[in-house]
Image (cartoon, rainbow, N blue to C red):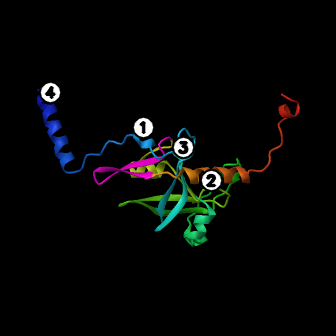
Amino acid sequence: MSMGWLLVEADDWESKRARGMATPLIEFSDEDKLGTLQPHDDALVITLRIGGYNVKRVLVDQGSAMEVMYPDLYKGLKLKPEDLTAYDSPLVSFEGKIVTPKGMIRLPIQTGSNVVEVDFIVVDAYSPYIAIVARPWLHALGAVSSTLHQKVKYPSEGRVKQIIGNQAMARQCMMSAISQRPSIEPSTSAKNGL
């Protein structure tokens, strides 16, 4: 009895796969590291089409629960305060400072033929990145990211497509962030020679 059920299930799966409805398997292998500088600990920085424009220096942060837009993108898209909806929960910047957002805006992000709309929190703070995309975008796209492989992979049209990271840009962003960091007072233990 259960054998027949398995056969029906397998036949159903095959028919879905033939119609292109099955989700392709997303995986990473050593081949995906080809073309990357290894070993590394670079962030995953990509170019995305946001609001109809190709936007460079977009950080993929799967540890974040919200997409963030910084002043360069806000100005580049010619957004105005009246384009934003209220968002009053404070955020913590990379430097650990509390930042009050200017507001929120819903914008499309296009990857190939896929378009996903996400809510960007607009902040007026320094960042070496133009924007940060996070779990809401990754989940809506069905994407999986790998900093090790410097790729975002996502299912589309029955295939796995990918966005390749830019390690040189990631390193430039890191250097920019380090150069913008305010000097820090030596700790008490450092002053005491510990």
Residue on which the image places disc 2: 173
Check the image and report above or below for 94 versus 56.
above
Q: How far across and how far down the image is residue 192, in percent? A: 88, 30
Identify the secondary structure beneath mark 4. helix
Identify the secondary structure beneath mark 1. helix
| Relative depth, front residue between 183 and 172 | 172
Identify the secondary structure beneath mark 2. helix
Q: Which mark is residue 146?
A: none
Residue on which the image places disc 3: 63
| Magenta-drawn segment | 148-163
Answer few, some or many: residues within 10 Å of disc 2's Cα (few below 14, many 20 plus, some between 14 and 19).
Answer: many
Task: Please state which of the two labelled residues, at mark 1 or mark 3, is closer to the viewer.
Answer: 1
* Residue type for callout 2: Cys
Q: CA distance from mark 1 to mark 3?
A: 24 Å
Residue on which the image places disc 4: 2
Task: Please state which of the two labelled residues, at mark 2 or mark 1, is closer to the viewer.
Answer: 1
Answer few, some or many: residues within 10 Å of disc 1's Cα (few below 14, many 20 plus, some between 14 and 19).
Answer: few
Q: Quadrant of residue 103?
A: bottom right
Residue 119 visible from this viewpoint? yes
